[in-house]
Amino acid sequence: MAALLETRDLTIRFGGHVAVDSVSCAFAAGTLTAIVGPNGAGKTTYFNLVSGQLRASSGSVWLDGEDIGTLPAPLRTRKGLGRAFQLTQLFPTLSVLENVRLAVQARAQGRHEASAGRVSGVFDLARVWLDRRTWIDEAMGLLEQVRLADRADAPAASLPHGDQRKLEVALLIALDPKVYLFDEPTAGMSVDEVPVVLDLIRSLKSRRDRAILLVEHKMDVVRELADRIVVLHQGQLVADGEPAAVIASPVVQQAYLGVVAEEEAA
Ligand SMILES: Nc1ncnc2c1ncn2[C@@H]1O[C@H](COP(=O)(O)OP(=O)(O)OP(=O)(O)O)[C@@H](O)[C@H]1O
């Protein structure tokens, strides 16, 4: 199957330190790939290079057959690369519902611009009103999915941490990207909130035309969700394959699981 996302020899150096070192990897539609590795392995930096938050020292990033490696982050988002928002990128004083509605609207209007001709006058106004209703309904539906419907009217900035993370996921889904980049989506959540987000990611997996990349430390989550595991260690891709085989491989036992075991024992 053709790759939806691919990185070729992707590399970034910070001074003398190579944080991501010539990583070549392709991600097909309909797959969920977990990216794992010990602290400092380069996972978040890899995501930053893919999404455009960082510019690579060398190498390239391909989305749906197009080299997007030199585009700024917002353009990559428009082309279908979805990275979870941080609260700083939201409108903190607007309500939770308004934030999601704006994301739904941005997506819908992006598509509309791509396909529409001119329409005029009263018809335009009626369409704006009808569209607004549709966007609000869709936004509300997403808030129900992440169990935030009862917080719809609260200012986004007033949400506790776990709810903010759920809002980030709702916003990402609202944009309906081709490629989802989830960086520890359940970090800092309470035990009862984690299944809500995992269920959502699981439901995204059923979209066979999307690719999901997930950076995750919790191996039980990885085992349950991933079709494939890619292991980074000291910036390099050191293992890549089906979960059971990768987890059992000596390189992973040493490079990653050994480290985790030591950290958990500490
Ligand atoms: N902007 C930066 N300037 C200098 N060094 C950086 C920068 N960003 C990341 N690094 C370094 O790159 C390496 C990889 O960091 P990164 O955050 O990608 O690791 P990670 O695998 O995501 O770790 P963790 O699991 O702890 O989140 C680290 O040594 C880090 O200190």
Image (cartoon, helix red, strand yellow):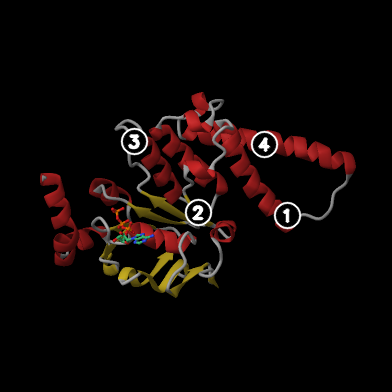
Question: Circle 1 sits in a helix, a strand or a loop, which is it?
Answer: helix
Q: Which residue is mark 1?
A: 113
Q: Earlier in the sequence, mark 1 or mark 4?
A: 1
The disc at residue 82 is 2
Question: Tag on residue 189?
Answer: 3
Of the image marks 3 and 1, the number of the one nearer the N terminus: 1
The kind of residue on which mark 3 rests is Met
Tell me which label, 2 or 3, sits earlier in the chain: 2
Q: Amino acid at mark 2?
A: Gly
Q: Which residue: 38% across, 50% down? A: 183
What residue lies at 13% left-to-right and 57% top-to-bottom? Answer: 258
Q: Nearer the viewer, residue 99 or 3?
A: 99
Between label 2 and label 4, give the one nearer the viewer.
2
- The amino acid pointed to by label 1 is Glu
- In space, the residues marked 3 and 1 are separated at their CA atoms by 38 Å
CA gap, disc 2 and disc 3: 21 Å
Alpha-carbon neighbours of circle 4 within 10 Å: few (<14), some, or many (≥20)?
A: some
